[in-house]
Structure formats: C-alpha cells, structure tokens
C-alpha cells in the first residue's frame, strides 16, 4: 500500500512540478554571468577512440549461465524509514551503497555493503539542511563528501560520507539532469534546453556546464541546437571507476570528461539500423513530430562500463529493445533480447545499469525474484545457490528493490 501511495504522489508531483518550478524560479533571478570569462572545453574526436559496429543480428534470450561468470544479490533492508519507490541511480563507494529515488520519496538512502539501512537524506523543509526537490547526487571523491542537487532551492547540498550536513553552494543555472565531480573539484553538470537559462547568453545551447568548487560558472562543452520537444530529462553523465563519462542520449557516442577536454571514447556504428541524427534535434515542431521520429530510429539508452566490458541497451524501431555486451579485451560482442533462466540469476536492465570494478549493478523488483523462485520450483532443473535461499524464501512483494552485482564471462 505504501508503494501505491508513493506512486500516486509521484505522478501528481510530476504533473504539477513544471509550472510550479517555473513560477518559483522566476521569483529567484540568477546572478549575472560574465560570459567573456567562460572557457569552452574542446571536444576531441581524434584517435584513439573505438568505433563499435553493432551488427543486425540479435539473439533471442540467452541462458544466463552462458554469459554470467559470477553474481550476488544485496537485498536492501526494508523499514518505514528506508522504504523507497524507485531507484534512479545506485552507486557503491567507500563500503556503502547509495540509492537515489528522485521520483517517489525524493531521498538518497545509504545502506552498508550488506544492504543494512544506515540513513536517508531528503527531509522536506526550508531549513538549510532540508530539501524541496532533490533531483541528483554525486560523490566528491577528493573531499569525501556527498553532494545532492536541489532543483527548487537551486543549491548543491553538501554532506559528510555519514550523512551529516556541511553546507551548500548556489547553482548559477537550472538543470533537470545530473552532475559529477572531477578530481580537481570542478562540478560538471549535464543539461538540455531550458528557458530559465537564457542568462547564459551564447552558452545557452551547451550541454555540459562546469563550475568551480565554490559554484562559479567557468566552462562549457558540447553544443548543438535542440527544441523543447526533444529535450527530455535524462542522466547522461556517469562514472566508470575514477573516470567521468558523458553519453548524450540519442547520439550513440560516449565521451571521457576531464577539466581540459571532452574526448570521444566510443562511437556506436548503427549503420545496419536507422540511427538517430544529431542535426534533427532542432527540427521538431511538436512532441508528436519528435516521438514519431524517435520510434522509427535507433539509439543507445542505458550505458555502463566496468573494468572488462561495456553493457548498453539499444532502442530500435517501435521501442523494441535489446542488450549488447562488448568485451574490451577480445573486442567481441553479443546482441540479445535478455537472459533466459537456467540459474537463479535475474536482472532488469530497464531500472538502469551501473558498474563497480569488474561487476555491473542492476536493480531487481521483488516480484521478479518471487516469479523466478516459482519457476525454479516448477521446473526443478537447477538449485538455488545456498547463499540466495534466504532471500528467495522470505522476500515480500512490497519489500525494497534488490541490488544484483554480476560479472560477465570473456566473450
């Protein structure tokens, strides 16, 4: 019942937030930006970057045992204080799991590496340490701090790794997307077209905005024009180990982000399909125009990279989706529509893909685990691993999502 209430509240909030935010933001003008001092970070598309050709062949569901080398589940403790509705980002760092729910509870939840609940951040209110609409988080690995962006307060809220409030920084622009923090302390924020950012002048169409460690707008990178109809909210910046990457949605490219350059890292060649074209981003005259184009073209949605592999989801015509695994050492890949169950492994790529060392991380709904157990009981073709039995026996459908860490075999 709690999850149903959270879902209803989330939908109502999503319907109302756009107009409320615009009214709220217009009442709080941005500080003047001295655009003559802004540096444009160059985008480099020179070698060495990899072009990965995506073949037309897509296999039907592949038995999990053929691709999964190792996996383990981390059930996230379910209490009144730790219950969340969605997971819009998960990260493992410093012996903790950070689970962010930007749509339902609008909180960041801290668990230990075994899934025991530690603390949540996101209490509503106007006190300095409270939030109105937290929408993204990042970890400052140099200062060892948690930073949460509040899209209504327009602040970066800083906390210790244990969740104690430190202070906040004003954000000199508006964004619906996420951000990361570079080793030198600069914040790199992804954005898209936003009428509130007209004060950025010639940098209005830049997609990555750099601010220094005290919140001053210093640099901009990666520009192309778009319309409000194609500017959907998404989270295009992420991490692989210590490196920050930028994967602009629809454009089938991944860049390495540093303080001095945006270096093309991977280019996905969808010539066997119908790839999304960058020059079309500014031509949509209505949402239907954009949506019809999107449904007839091919583009990468979720992307993650670990020490050994890439894993990404492709959206093809009519929203048909498939997964690609790419072995960075052998340069081999496989396209497939999903995993078939011949072990007690299950995942949901639709919940997002993340990485930790040589593992990928995904989230699993309790109903999926219950359905898998029922299938195993009926087929009796294989046993549940001993360490997974308590989870399969005791999980309830209204428990929190379960994190699954999995390692891919050599391809």
Image (cartoon, grey):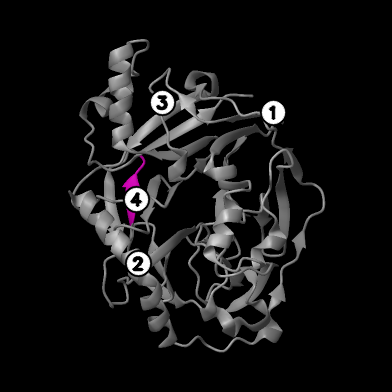
Q: Which residue is pictured at 56% across the width and 51% down the height?
A: 239
Upstream in sequence: badge 1 or badge 3: 1
State the residue position of label 1.
Answer: 332
Magenta residues (range): 108-113
Q: Is residue 143 magenta?
A: no
Q: Which mark is residue 345?
A: 3
**Disc 4 and disc 1: Cα gap in Å?**
34 Å
User: Horizontally, is 122 left or right of 253 in the view?
Assistant: left
Upstream in sequence: badge 4 or badge 1: 4
**Disc 3 and disc 4: Cα gap in Å?**
21 Å
Q: Quadrant of residue 396?
A: top left
- Image coordinates for residue 168, horizontal then vertical, percent: 41, 74
Upstream in sequence: badge 3 or badge 4: 4
State the residue position of label 4.
Answer: 86
**Disc 2 and disc 3: Cα gap in Å?**
36 Å
Upstream in sequence: badge 2 or badge 1: 2
User: Horizontally, is 2 left or right of 267 in the view?
Assistant: left
Q: Residues at badges 2 and 1 in contact (C-beta under 8 Å)?
A: no
User: Horizontally, is 180 left or right of 125 in the view?
Assistant: right
**Disc 4 and disc 2: Cα gap in Å?**
17 Å
State the residue position of label 2.
Answer: 15
Q: Nearer the viewer, residue 173 or 257?
A: 173
Residue lying farthest to the top in this orientation: 381
């Amino acid at each position: 019942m709690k999850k149903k209430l959270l879902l209803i509240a989330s939908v109502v909030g999503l319907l109302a937030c756009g107009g409320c935010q615009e009214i709220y933001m217009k009442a709080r003008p941005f500080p003047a930006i001295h655009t003559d001092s802004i540096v444009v970070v160059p985008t480099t598309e020179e070698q060495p970057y990899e072009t990965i050709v995506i073949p037309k062949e897509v296999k039907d569901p592949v038995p999990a045992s053929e691709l999964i080398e190792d996996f383990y589940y981390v059930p996230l403790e379910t209490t009144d204080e730790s219950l969340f509705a969605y997971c819009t980002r998960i990260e493992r760092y410093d012996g903790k799991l950070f689970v962010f729910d930007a749509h339902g509870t609008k909180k960041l939840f801290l668990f230990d590496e075994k899934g025991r609940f530690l603390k949540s951040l996101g209490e509503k209110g106007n006190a300095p340490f409270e939030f109105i609409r937290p929408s993204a988080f990042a970890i400052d690995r140099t200062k060892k701090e948690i930073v949460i962006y509040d899209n209504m307060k327009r602040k970066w809220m800083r906390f210790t790794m244990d969740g104690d409030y430190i202070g906040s920084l004003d954000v000199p622009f508006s964004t619906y997307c996420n951000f990361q923090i570079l080793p030198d302390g600069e914040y790199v924020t992804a954005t898209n077209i936003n009428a509130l950012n007209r004060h950025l002048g010639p940098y209005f169409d830049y997609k990555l905005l750099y601010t220094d460690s005290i919140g001053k707008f210093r640099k901009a990178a990666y520009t192309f024009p778009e319309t409000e109809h194609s500017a959907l909210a998404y989270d295009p910046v992420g991490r692989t180990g210590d490196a920050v990457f930028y994967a602009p949605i629809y454009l089938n490219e991944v860049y390495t982000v540093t303080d001095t350059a945006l270096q093309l890292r991977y280019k996905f060649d969808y010539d066997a399909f119908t790839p999304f074209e960058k020059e079309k981003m500014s031509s949509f005259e209505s949402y239907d125009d954009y949506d019809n184009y999107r449904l007839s073209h091919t583009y990468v949605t979720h992307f993650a990279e670990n020490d050994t592999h890439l894993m990404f989801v492709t959206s093809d015509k009519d929203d048909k989706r498939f997964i690609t695994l790419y072995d960075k050492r052998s340069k081999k890949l496989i396209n497939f529509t999903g995993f078939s169950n011949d072990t007690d492994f299950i995942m949901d790529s639709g919940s997002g893909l993340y990485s930790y060392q040589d593992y990928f991380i995904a989230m699993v709904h309790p109903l999926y685990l219950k359905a898998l157990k029922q299938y195993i009981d009926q087929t009796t073709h294989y046993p549940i691993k001993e360490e997974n039995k308590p989870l399969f026996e005791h999980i309830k459908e209204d428990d929190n999502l379960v994190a699954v860490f999995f390692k891919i075999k050599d391809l």
